[in-house]
């Protein structure tokens, strides 16, 4: 593989991507900044080339793009025209028109084009998907994601704050979470969105939106880049008829379940959240087993609290997800019958929702959502 623009995240990602058998970093293109030279040293790359040379190399099959978002379209198009597979940092592009053009070319060239939405490979992503589908805690009713993110490394001149370069917070960052919830609930539609400008500046520092999913279910997404590094923290909450689940960290690693369950549901929960610590807060018998909500009766044996994932090291899990992205795509490159977890559709549909939320927050009328299938 070759990499375009290895900065803060690039080196971290590359060290995981290159652990996959068959993957070697063969060359780099970039702006010759100090960080890029550090990456070159780490991989013994003799020099930094320009992108046209890199994508033209016959010994390069795949290009990893880790530049700021406004460059993704132009650089991915160069790689695709040269017939290379592309793993692009999120977001896939800045606009849907760009994303569609890129996907059309990737299809024509029979190559992969994915945005690095690595959350799909998180074991907690699968556990929650099963929890929702199996209805162990009844119907899913409501959710939120609260992101109290650090801006300590983001000086006022950083490209992150320049919406012509980053696309704004929904597009640059929100796509990870739009993609996860789409995997859990199907594609949603933004129904309201707001943004807050840091007083005395023109920097967008907080955004919020509500997304409606099937059966009218509402999920709220908040992102604020306002915290010192050591206070960076996130929480997902998913509410069901018979309990709720809280996930901690933006790459979720820990889960807490609070549930009113009978014996059968307790067993199913323990199967889903394997090796969780189970605390019993209350036990019911006889007529006190019967509870009533949403005009329905349920049979409840106990109030259960599960703790899962206390032993997981966050950065190790993050690295594991990156290895999984590359392993899955490489398998597909060699065997086109392999079904990938992350496809072109994830990059496009997460961007579609982010663009919609951005438009609503800007007070524009948001275009109706066109998903990858519709396009
Ligand atoms: N998937 C994830 O979890 C994750 C995490 C962090 C960042 N990211 C994404 O990674 C991308 C890069 O973010 P970062 O934090 O590493 O940014 P960064 O500013 O640290 O690095 C960007 C790199 O691109 C290079 N660059 C700039 N202009 C270029 C050009 N014209 N041609 C070639 N290289 C150029 C810079 O020199 C720098 O090395 C963004 O899209 C960001 O959203 C993804």
Image (cartoon, rainbow, N blue to C red):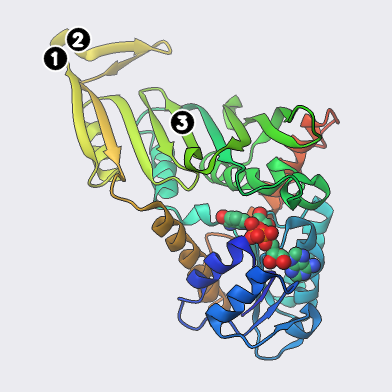
Residue beneath the point at 44% across and 26% down = 239
Residue under circle 1?
285
The response on whether ligand 1 sits within 8 Å of label 2 is: no
| Mark 1 vs 3: CB contact within 8 A | no
* Residue wearing tag 3: 237
Q: In which quarter of the image is residue 257?
A: top left
Nearer to us of marks 2 and 3 is 3
The location of residue 66, given as percent across then percent down, is 66, 65
Q: Mark 2 points at which residue?
A: 288
Q: In this view, does 107 lie above or below 280?
A: below
| Dot 2 or dot 3, earlier in sequence | 3
Residue nearest the viewer, comparing 181 with 151: 151
Ligand 1 location (quadrant): bottom right
Query: Which type of secondary structure does the marked residue at label 2 adopt?
Result: helix
Residue 2 vs residue 97: left or right?
A: left
- The local crowd at label 3, few if under 14, some if 14 to 19, many if 20 or more residues have their Cα within 10 Å, is many
Q: Do the residues labelled 2 and 1 touch (CB within 8 Å)?
A: yes
Q: Is mark 1 on a helix, strand or loop?
A: loop
């Amino acid at each position: 593989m070759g990499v375009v623009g290895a900065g803060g995240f690039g080196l971290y990602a590359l060290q995981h991507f290159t652990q996959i058998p068959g993957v070697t970093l063969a060359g780099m293109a970039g702006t010759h900044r100090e960080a890029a030279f550090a990456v070159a040293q780490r991989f013994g790359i003799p020099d930094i080339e320009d992108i046209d040379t890199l994508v033209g190399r016959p010994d390069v099959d795949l290009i990893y793009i880790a530049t700021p978002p406004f460059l993704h379209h132009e650089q991915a198009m160069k790689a695709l025209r040269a017939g290379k597979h592309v793993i692009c940092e999120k977001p896939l592009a800045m606009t849907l028109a760009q994303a569609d053009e890129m996907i059309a070319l990737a299809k024509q060239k029979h190559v992969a084009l994915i945005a690095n939405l690595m959350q799909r490979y998180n074991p907690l992503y699968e556990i929650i998907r099963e929890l929702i589908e199996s209805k162990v805690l009844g119907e899913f009713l409501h959710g939120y994601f609260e992101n109290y993110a650090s801006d300590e490394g983001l000086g006022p001149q950083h490209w992150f704050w320049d919406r012509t370069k980053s696309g704004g917070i929904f597009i640059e960052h929100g796509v990870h979470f739009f993609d996860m919830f789409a995997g859990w609930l199907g594609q949603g539609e933004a129904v309201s969105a707001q943004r807050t400008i840091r007083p005395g500046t023109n920097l967008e520092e907080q955004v919020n939106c509500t997304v409606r999913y099937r059966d009218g279910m509402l999920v709220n997404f908040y992102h604020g880049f306002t915290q010192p590094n050591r206070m960076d923290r996130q929480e997902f909450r998913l509410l069901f008829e018979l309990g709720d689940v809280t996930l901690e960290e933006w790459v979720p690693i820990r889960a807490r379940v609070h549930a009113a369950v009978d014996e059968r549901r307790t067993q199913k929960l323990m199967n889903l959240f394997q090796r969780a610590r189970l605390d019993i807060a209350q036990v019911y018998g006889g007529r006190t087993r019967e509870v009533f909500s949403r005009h329905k009766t349920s049979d409840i044996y106990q109030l259960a609290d599960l703790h899962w994932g206390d032993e997981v090291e966050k950065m190790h899990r993050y690295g594991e997800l990156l290895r999984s992205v590359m392993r899955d795509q490489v398998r597909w490159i060699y065997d086109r019958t392999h079904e990938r977890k992350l496809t072109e559709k994830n990059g496009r549909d997460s961007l579609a929702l982010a663009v919609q939320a951005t438009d609503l927050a800007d007070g524009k009328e948001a275009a109706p959502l066109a998903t990858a299938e519709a396009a």
